[in-house]
Image: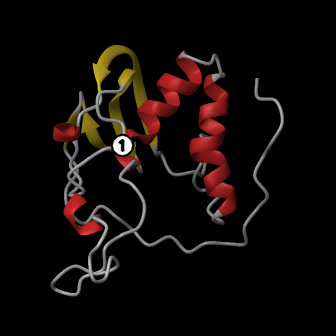
């Protein structure tokens, strides 16, 4: 919440009830749309680049590859089907988070997630969230792997 981060507070790290205030800015809900819009559409980066930086490399770094971050036999069926066409404007009132603001307010974006599958189960369908509580699962990790760099075809 913006008021919890205003200068001059006695302690900027906890609220009045003593609950921690998270650092940073709310950006998770806009991360993928901005990567698509700014990286792929506006700067001409290949879609394979986006898949690498948003899925494969994080899975490698956090020791979850090849179960996560790749589409192949034996991996979890986690996919997002992307609609590249919609033009829209980022607004805080669209967000589900409790931050109360977005640093991207008023930013024009292109493309939206159309469907998201987690382990083959539909979570987002035509832009409507269908995820039920309890869908998360602990994943034991292995040793991290180096992220991939270089050209992406």
**At 19% from the left edge and 44% from the top edge, which residue is drawn?**
130
| 22 up-or-down from 24: above or below | below
**Is 143 placed left or right of 100 in the picture?**
right
Question: Where is mark 1, residue-wise?
Answer: 103
The picture places residue 55, in percent across and down from the top left corner, at 58, 45
Can residue 1 be seen in the rendering of this structure? no
In the rendered image, residue 47, in percent from the top left (x then y), is placed at 61, 24
The type of colouring in the image is: secondary structure
Quadrant housing residue 132: bottom left
Name which residue lies at 51% across and 51% down. Answer: 76
The residue sitting at the right extreme is 150
Q: Quadrant of the N terminus?
A: bottom left
Q: Is residue 16 above or below residue 89?
A: below
Q: Is residue 73 left or right of residue 20?
A: right
From the viewer's perspective, tell me whether residue 21 is left or right of residue 17. Answer: right
Residue 3 in view of the camera: yes
Q: Nearer the viewer, residue 56 or 101?
A: 101
Residue 15 x %, y %: 22, 79
Which of the two residues, 81 or 49, is positioned nearer the viewer here? 49
- Element on which disc 1 rests: loop
Give the residue drawn at x 39%, y 55%: 25
The quadrant the C terminus occupies is: top right
At x 29%, y 20%, the residue is 88
Percent position of residue 136, x then y: 34, 64
Quarter-wise, where is residue 16 in the image? Answer: bottom left
């Amino acid at each position: 919440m913006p008021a919890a981060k205003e200068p001059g507070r006695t302690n900027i790290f906890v609220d009045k009830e003593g609950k921690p205030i998270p650092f940073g800015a709310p950006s998770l809900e806009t991360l993928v749309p901005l990567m698509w819009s700014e990286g792929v559409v506006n700067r001409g980066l290949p879609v394979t680049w986006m898949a690498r930086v948003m899925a494969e490399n994080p899975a490698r770094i956090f020791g979850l590859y090849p179960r996560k971050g790749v589409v192949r036999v034996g991996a979890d069926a986690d996919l997002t089907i992307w609609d590249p066409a919609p033009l829209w404007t980022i607004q805080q009132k669209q967000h589900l988070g409790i931050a109360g603001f977005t640093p991207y307010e008023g930013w024009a974006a292109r493309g939206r997630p159309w469907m998201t599958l987690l382990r083959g189960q539909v979570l987002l369908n035509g832009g409507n969230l269908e995820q039920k509580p309890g869908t998360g699962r602990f994943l034991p990790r292995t040793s991290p792997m180096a992220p991939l760099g270089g050209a992406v075809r």
